[in-house]
Amino acid sequence: MASAKPPPPSKPPASIHPTAVIAEKAVLSGTNRVTIGENVVLHPYARVRAENGVVAIGDNCIIYERATVGCETTSATGAKGGSDVSIGAGCVIESNAVVEGQIGECSELGVAACVGKGAKVGRYCKIAAMERVEAGEELEDFTVVFADGRRRVSRTMRDHESVREAKHKGQMMAVELMRKMIPNSAVKWTM
Amino acid sequence: MSRPAAVSRRSTKTEYIETDTGNKISRRSHIEGKQNIMLGGKSVIMAGVCLRGDLSRKTEKTAEGEKETSQTAISVGRASVIATNCTIRPPMRISRGHMIFYPMRIGDNVFIGPNSHISSLTISSHVHIGANSVLSPFCVVKEQCKILPDTVIPPHMIIPPGSVVAGRPAQIVGEVGEGWGQGGGGEGEEWVEGGDLRPLVRSIK
């Protein structure tokens, strides 16, 4: 058994919390450090790319199939830094979304949405399907991006503690459900 | 000499696997939980399609010691075509204090364009969905609708029969009118949007 085929090239040094669930077909690549917090769920075909900077994924995040977290491209100037990617606790990254910037806690990134390089998305933001946050842009907390680039601040989310609590609760239940359904193969990346 | 050999081996291996009921499933599709997926027959699943049958509703463990069974997560009707790189995932929500996945139904003669994301509850028959569309969780699309390309249908939207839908977020922009799905059979036009897709399915090899 020890003489199984050699590990695929560039398996990143990963610190994965023992409670995180990483589907068998999810892929971690690159050479920089990948940190995955507790109860994170990585669905099949999700990609974590640590080619050009460290990637940190906070607790209770859900990353759906074919989403990409991490910078795939090197910056045109070749300058170091700015390629680090972090996702706060309790975020949802939907299918085909691309994260190359930083996302605050409990934000939601819709299907095929894109957060450009070095962009900073605040807490409790919601970026609807197919919307873009350009590189270097900063979004304040509770922003909603929708309808081809329109922005607004969700006052419901901002002014009501109970709404945020409900969101937390829903996220925890979703994570709990998926932990039961998706076979974990995190071992593959920690060994 | 190794190269011609590789070519000949490739030609024997077709792109699609055909089932007994005439479903054509690409070898390059990503299907999870195939035991929870039902295909009605003569349906096509193209390359790169991601079907999440593993996310199904599990019946609660009962006191009688009944085995934990899971029901069909995705059911697709007859002669439906799911084009390349689509993602189909059952929707999820809290019901009676539990987070559960809901089974999703796709009708007959439904065309789903490339790169679409489908999390809807129901898509009825003779629906045409354009490329790059996003159908958010729990939306319901009734019969004979046309969804234009790049549409984002918001969660829980119900689209009445015969509508034309477009926009981000989606709005009903018109009706398909008389004769939707009719016609075809002409030269080089064996099938029409919303019509019988069997000629199209037949032409896919």
Image (cartoon, rainbow, N blue to C red):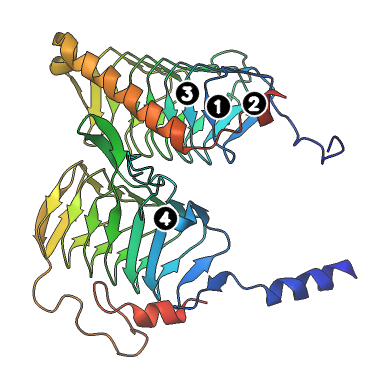
Q: Secondary structure at mark 3?
A: loop
Instruction: Relative to A108, say whether B11 is above or below.
Output: below
Q: Are marks 1 and 2 on the same chain?
A: yes
Return the residue nearer the eye: B151 or B74. Answer: B74
Circle 1: residue type: Cys
Q: Which residue is mark 2?
A: A51
Q: Position of residue B10 (x, y in %)?
A: 71, 71
Which of the two discs, 4 and 3, sits closer to the camera?
Answer: 4
Q: Are marks 1 and 2 in contact (CB under 8 Å)?
A: yes
Label 4, label 3: how far apart the Cα atoms are: 25 Å
Chain name for mark 1 = A
Checking the image for residue B36, the label placed there is: 4
Which of the two discs, 3 and 2, sits closer to the camera?
Answer: 3
Q: Secondary structure at mark 1?
A: loop
Q: Are marks 3 and 1 in contact (CB under 8 Å)?
A: no
Q: Which residue is mark 3?
A: A40
Instruction: Relative to B114, say whether B125 is above or below.
Output: below
* Residue A133 in sight from this viewpoint: no
Chain name for mark 2 = A
Number of marks drawn: 4
Q: Residues within 10 Å of mark 1 (few under 14, many from 20)?
A: many
Horizontal side of B120 relative to A135 (left or right) equals left
Q: Position of residue B89 (x, y in %)?
A: 37, 47
Which of the two discs, 4 and 2, sits closer to the camera?
Answer: 4
Residue A36 quadrant? top right
Label 4, label 1: how far apart the Cα atoms are: 35 Å
